[in-house]
Image (spheres, rainbow, N blue to C red):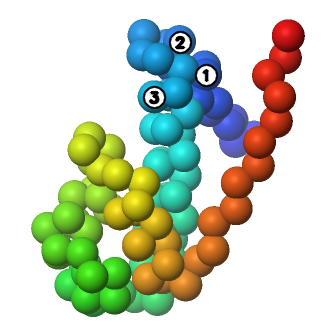
Amino acid sequence: MKQSVKGLDLAKKLGISPLRGVEAVIKAQLITAVIKEVQKQDLTHAELAKKSKLPRSAVTGILSGSLQKITIDRILRLVEAVGLLPELRLHKRAA
């Protein structure tokens, strides 16, 4: 059974702010989806860079798992470049 990591749990374990934990999980989920599509479509980093209008070095860094200094907008450009459409669900915190 695959265990889901929640941003708040991650933040607590790493000693970072809750929002940073949520951000890290969202980025990781988006990047994982992009990597799967890149493999399905047999795209090179150079091809993905061209489609996303990002530098190849940025694409390589993102796809290799670097989350530092990687903005959501850059990741979303990769998501769009591989033909995916992200969805976001929000819910209220438990009291």
| Residue 82 coordinates in the image, percent (x, y) | 48, 82
Seen at 42% across and 16% down, the residue is 16
Seen at 54% across and 20% down, the residue is 18
**Is 17 located above or below residue 61 in the figure?**
above
Seen at 22% across and 58% down, the residue is 61
**Element at badge 3?**
helix
Rounded to the nearest angstrom, the CA distance separating label 2 from label 1 is 6 Å
Q: Would you identify the image quadrant in which residue 91 lies?
A: top right
Pick the front one: 47 or 75? 75
| Residue 83 coordinates in the image, percent (x, y) | 55, 84
**Is 1 located above or below residue 34 in the figure?**
above
Q: Which mark is residue 8?
A: 1
Q: Amino acid at mark 2?
A: Lys
Q: Amino acid at mark 3?
A: Arg
> Is 7 situated left or right of 91 in this image?
left
Q: Amino acid at mark 1?
A: Leu
The residue that label 2 is drawn on is 12
